[in-house]
Image (tube, grey):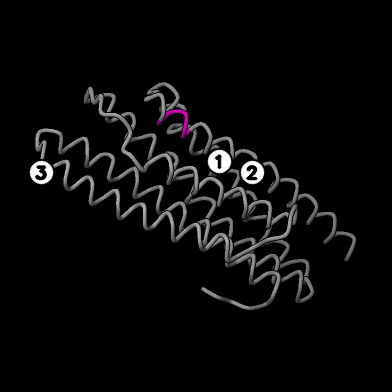
Amino acid sequence: MLEKFQEEYKNLESDLNELAGTLESRLQATRLALVNNDAVLADKIYHGDSVINEAIKRCMEEDMNLSMLQEPVARDWRNLMATLKILSDLERIADHCADISYYILVMDKEGSKMPLPSHLLEMYDIMTSMVKEVLNGYFRQEPFDQKAVKDKDDIVDALFHKQLKEFAEEIRKAPDRALDYLFFTMIVKYIERMADHSDNVAEWIGYRDTNKITL
């Protein structure tokens, strides 16, 4: 029984590693689509969302099978439970890559030529670093600092609210550009939510490692 558990858990870990690499690539591609206003790349990301969702679904099924059928000990069960929660947040991060890509496509269709807002890439890069940190922490590739992830989430939140205030001011100055600013409002909101989901992952890693829930 133990050997079967270990074998199936290794399969889950392998699939999770592949998923992590796919997600990081998706984040990089989404940033590139934003910077270059690349509708072709955005379309590929948007219509490729089902691929990563299927990978997440497969990992979830493997996790639940291990939890229900292999009678894991308490520590392993806690790890599997945390993983299931983490997979849900990773799915939302991937979904938001598709959401952002959708608005790149909409702006391209509308002929929008507005440059990227002042804080958007800063928010995006901080969020991406959060995802990388929690993935490394999950696989124990380096010491994990849950507070550092939380602090970055607070920075993204602050930049988000600052960006919204700037949008409001710009709309007052140029109401004819209001639609462009509304599109970008959606994009920065998705980035802010991606940071929140990364923070959730950090909290579930904390639960896995300490048996303490800090949600």
> Residue at the spot x=33%, y=33% of the render?
116
Circle 1 sits in a helix, a strand or a loop, which is it?
helix
Whether residue 181 is in magenta: the answer is: no
Q: Which residue is mark 1?
A: 52
Whether pointer 2 and pointer 1 mark residues with C-beta atoms closer than 8 Å, the reply is yes
Q: Which residues are magenta?
A: 30-34
Taking 131 as reference, is 67 above or below it? below
Q: Earlier in the sequence, mark 1 or mark 3?
A: 1
Q: Quadrant of residue 7?
A: bottom right
Closer to the camera in the image, 52 or 64: 52
* Numbered tag placed on residue 19 in the rendering: 2
Amino acid type, residue under disc 2 in the picture: Leu
Residue 194 rendering spot, x and y as whole percentages? 45, 51
Whether residue 32 is in magenta: the answer is: yes
Within 10 Å of disc 3 (Cα), the crowding (few <14, some 14-19, many 20+) is few
Magenta highlight: main SS = helix
Circle 3 sits in a helix, a strand or a loop, which is it?
helix
Q: Earlier in the sequence, mark 2 or mark 1?
A: 2
Q: Is residue 112 left or right of residue 202?
A: left
Amino acid type, residue under disc 3 in the picture: Arg
Amino acid type, residue under disc 1 in the picture: Ile
* Numbered tag placed on residue 115 in the rendering: none
Q: Which residue is mark 3?
A: 172
**Marks 2 and 1, how far apart at CA:** 7 Å
